[in-house]
Amino acid sequence: MRGRILIFALLVVFGVIGTKAQTAPVGKTVEVKIYLFDTHGGYDSKKPNFLAVERTVAVGESVLRSALEALLKGGTPEEASQSLHSPVSGIELVSVEMAGKTARLFFDRTEREPLTEFEKRLFTGSVSKTALQFSAVRAVEICLDGVIAAGSKTKPKKCG
Protein backbone atom coordinates (compact mmCIF):
# COMPACT_ATOMS: atom_id res chain seq x y z
CA MET A 1 0.00 0.00 0.00
CA ARG A 2 2.82 2.37 0.90
CA GLY A 3 4.42 1.75 -2.50
CA ARG A 4 1.21 2.65 -4.33
CA ILE A 5 0.92 5.92 -2.43
CA LEU A 6 4.54 6.78 -3.25
CA ILE A 7 4.02 6.03 -6.96
CA PHE A 8 0.83 8.13 -7.04
CA ALA A 9 2.60 11.00 -5.27
CA LEU A 10 5.47 10.87 -7.77
CA LEU A 11 3.06 10.91 -10.73
CA VAL A 12 1.29 13.94 -9.28
CA VAL A 13 4.56 15.74 -8.54
CA PHE A 14 5.91 15.12 -12.03
CA GLY A 15 2.62 16.27 -13.52
CA VAL A 16 1.69 13.13 -15.42
CA ILE A 17 -1.62 12.96 -13.60
CA GLY A 18 -3.33 15.76 -11.81
CA THR A 19 -5.64 16.36 -8.93
CA LYS A 20 -8.42 18.92 -8.98
CA ALA A 21 -7.01 20.87 -6.00
CA GLN A 22 -3.46 21.08 -7.32
CA THR A 23 -2.27 24.44 -8.60
CA ALA A 24 0.73 25.33 -10.72
CA PRO A 25 3.87 26.32 -8.84
CA VAL A 26 4.77 29.90 -9.71
CA GLY A 27 7.56 30.04 -12.28
CA LYS A 28 8.02 26.27 -12.70
CA THR A 29 8.33 25.23 -16.34
CA VAL A 30 9.42 22.20 -18.30
CA GLU A 31 10.42 21.56 -21.92
CA VAL A 32 8.06 19.34 -23.90
CA LYS A 33 7.74 18.37 -27.54
CA ILE A 34 4.74 18.92 -29.75
CA TYR A 35 4.49 17.30 -33.16
CA LEU A 36 3.67 19.46 -36.15
CA PHE A 37 2.77 18.26 -39.64
CA ASP A 38 5.73 18.74 -41.98
CA THR A 39 4.63 19.66 -45.51
CA HIS A 40 8.15 20.43 -46.76
CA GLY A 41 8.70 18.69 -50.08
CA GLY A 42 5.13 17.40 -50.30
CA TYR A 43 3.55 14.71 -48.19
CA ASP A 44 2.30 11.16 -48.26
CA SER A 45 -1.39 11.01 -47.28
CA LYS A 46 -0.96 7.41 -46.07
CA LYS A 47 1.97 8.17 -43.77
CA PRO A 48 2.20 11.85 -42.84
CA ASN A 49 5.50 13.22 -41.61
CA PHE A 50 5.59 14.90 -38.21
CA LEU A 51 8.42 16.94 -36.77
CA ALA A 52 8.96 17.55 -33.06
CA VAL A 53 9.38 21.14 -31.90
CA GLU A 54 10.00 22.19 -28.33
CA ARG A 55 7.75 24.27 -26.15
CA THR A 56 8.22 25.52 -22.61
CA VAL A 57 5.07 24.90 -20.58
CA ALA A 58 4.08 25.61 -17.00
CA VAL A 59 4.19 22.68 -14.64
CA GLY A 60 0.60 22.61 -13.51
CA GLU A 61 -2.18 20.15 -13.09
CA SER A 62 -0.71 17.89 -15.79
CA VAL A 63 2.32 18.27 -18.02
CA LEU A 64 0.56 16.06 -20.57
CA ARG A 65 -2.40 18.46 -20.62
CA SER A 66 -0.03 21.45 -20.91
CA ALA A 67 1.74 19.82 -23.87
CA LEU A 68 -1.57 19.14 -25.62
CA GLU A 69 -2.72 22.71 -25.01
CA ALA A 70 0.56 23.93 -26.54
CA LEU A 71 -0.16 21.72 -29.57
CA LEU A 72 -3.64 23.22 -29.87
CA LYS A 73 -2.12 26.71 -30.00
CA GLY A 74 -0.33 25.66 -33.18
CA GLY A 75 2.99 26.56 -34.68
CA THR A 76 4.78 29.87 -34.63
CA PRO A 77 5.02 32.07 -37.73
CA GLU A 78 8.65 30.95 -38.07
CA GLU A 79 7.59 27.27 -38.01
CA ALA A 80 4.88 27.99 -40.61
CA SER A 81 7.55 29.53 -42.85
CA GLN A 82 9.40 26.20 -42.55
CA SER A 83 6.29 24.29 -43.74
CA LEU A 84 5.38 23.06 -40.24
CA HIS A 85 1.69 23.20 -39.36
CA SER A 86 -0.55 22.11 -36.52
CA PRO A 87 -3.33 19.82 -37.70
CA VAL A 88 -5.56 20.64 -34.74
CA SER A 89 -7.25 23.94 -35.59
CA GLY A 90 -10.86 24.24 -34.54
CA ILE A 91 -10.50 21.62 -31.82
CA GLU A 92 -10.46 22.10 -28.04
CA LEU A 93 -9.19 19.82 -25.28
CA VAL A 94 -11.98 18.88 -22.89
CA SER A 95 -10.24 16.50 -20.50
CA VAL A 96 -7.28 14.22 -19.93
CA GLU A 97 -7.67 10.96 -18.00
CA MET A 98 -5.17 8.24 -17.19
CA ALA A 99 -6.40 4.64 -17.02
CA GLY A 100 -3.31 2.71 -16.05
CA LYS A 101 -0.77 3.60 -18.73
CA THR A 102 -3.46 4.62 -21.25
CA ALA A 103 -4.06 8.33 -21.75
CA ARG A 104 -7.71 8.96 -22.57
CA LEU A 105 -7.93 12.33 -24.32
CA PHE A 106 -11.27 14.01 -24.94
CA PHE A 107 -11.61 16.73 -27.59
CA ASP A 108 -14.51 18.67 -29.08
CA ARG A 109 -14.62 20.40 -32.45
CA THR A 110 -15.39 24.10 -32.25
CA GLU A 111 -15.96 24.11 -36.00
CA ARG A 112 -18.69 21.75 -37.07
CA GLU A 113 -17.40 20.78 -40.50
CA PRO A 114 -16.48 17.09 -40.41
CA LEU A 115 -12.84 16.10 -40.66
CA THR A 116 -11.72 14.26 -43.75
CA GLU A 117 -9.98 10.93 -43.17
CA PHE A 118 -6.65 12.61 -43.91
CA GLU A 119 -7.34 15.43 -41.41
CA LYS A 120 -8.33 12.85 -38.79
CA ARG A 121 -5.08 10.94 -39.45
CA LEU A 122 -3.09 14.16 -39.04
CA PHE A 123 -4.93 15.08 -35.84
CA THR A 124 -4.64 11.66 -34.19
CA GLY A 125 -1.01 11.24 -35.27
CA SER A 126 0.04 14.61 -33.90
CA VAL A 127 -1.84 14.14 -30.61
CA SER A 128 -0.60 10.55 -30.14
CA LYS A 129 3.04 11.45 -30.74
CA THR A 130 2.78 14.39 -28.36
CA ALA A 131 1.23 12.20 -25.61
CA LEU A 132 3.57 9.22 -26.05
CA GLN A 133 6.68 11.26 -25.19
CA PHE A 134 5.82 10.80 -21.51
CA SER A 135 7.08 7.62 -19.82
CA ALA A 136 3.81 7.13 -17.94
CA VAL A 137 1.89 6.92 -21.25
CA ARG A 138 2.12 3.67 -23.21
CA ALA A 139 -1.17 3.89 -25.13
CA VAL A 140 -3.45 6.71 -26.25
CA GLU A 141 -7.20 6.72 -26.79
CA ILE A 142 -8.45 9.86 -28.55
CA CYS A 143 -12.11 10.81 -28.33
CA LEU A 144 -13.38 13.49 -30.69
CA ASP A 145 -16.93 14.76 -30.27
CA GLY A 146 -17.82 11.76 -28.11
CA VAL A 147 -16.59 9.12 -30.57
CA ILE A 148 -13.29 7.27 -30.39
CA ALA A 149 -11.12 8.64 -33.19
CA ALA A 150 -8.02 6.54 -32.42
CA GLY A 151 -6.78 3.94 -29.99
CA SER A 152 -9.61 1.42 -30.12
CA LYS A 153 -9.69 -1.72 -32.20
CA THR A 154 -13.48 -1.49 -32.56
CA LYS A 155 -14.03 1.89 -34.20
CA PRO A 156 -16.13 3.91 -34.18
CA LYS A 157 -17.63 3.59 -30.71
CA LYS A 158 -18.82 6.07 -28.15
CA CYS A 159 -16.38 7.36 -25.56
CA GLY A 160 -17.39 7.03 -22.00
Image (tube, grey):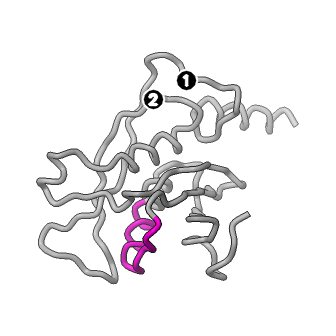
In the image, is 3 to the left or to the right of 18?
Answer: right
Q: Return the x and y of residue 43 as percentages of the image width and height.
A: 21, 76
Q: Which residue is mark 2?
A: 58
The quadrant the C terminus occupies is bottom right
As drawn, 61 above or below 85: above
The answer to whether mark 2 and mark 1 are in CB contact below 8 A is: yes
Residue 148, relative to residue 7: is it above or below?
A: below
Which three-letter amino acid code belongs to the residue tagged 2?
Ala
Is residue 136 rendered to the left or right of residue 160? Answer: left
Instruction: Judge from the rendering whether residue 136 lies leftward or rightward of residue 43; answer left or right.
Output: right
Whether residue 148 is situated above or below residue 79 in the rendered picture: below
What percent of the width, then of the height, locates residue 132?
49, 56
Query: Are there few (<14), some (14-19), or many (20+) residues within 10 Å of tag 1?
Result: few
SS assignment for the magenta stretch, majority: helix
Category of crowding for the residue at label 2, using alpha-carbon neighbours closer than 10 angstroms: few (below 14), some (14–19), many (at least 20) = some
Name the secondary structure under disc 1.
loop
Residue at the spot x=62%, y=81% of the render?
155
Above or below — where is 41 with respect to 53? below
In depth, the one of 66 and 134 nearer the eye is 66
Magenta-colored span: 112-126
Residue drawn 28% across and 69% down?
Answer: 49
Within the magenta stretch, is there residue 115? yes
Residue extending farthest top = 26
Which residue sits at x=13%, y=55%? 82
Give the position of the N terminus as an image quadrant.
Answer: top right
> Residue 126 appears at what percent x and percent y?
40, 61
Q: Which residue is mark 1?
A: 24
- Residue 154: which quarter of the image? bottom right
Q: Who comes first in sequence, dot 2 or dot 1?
A: 1
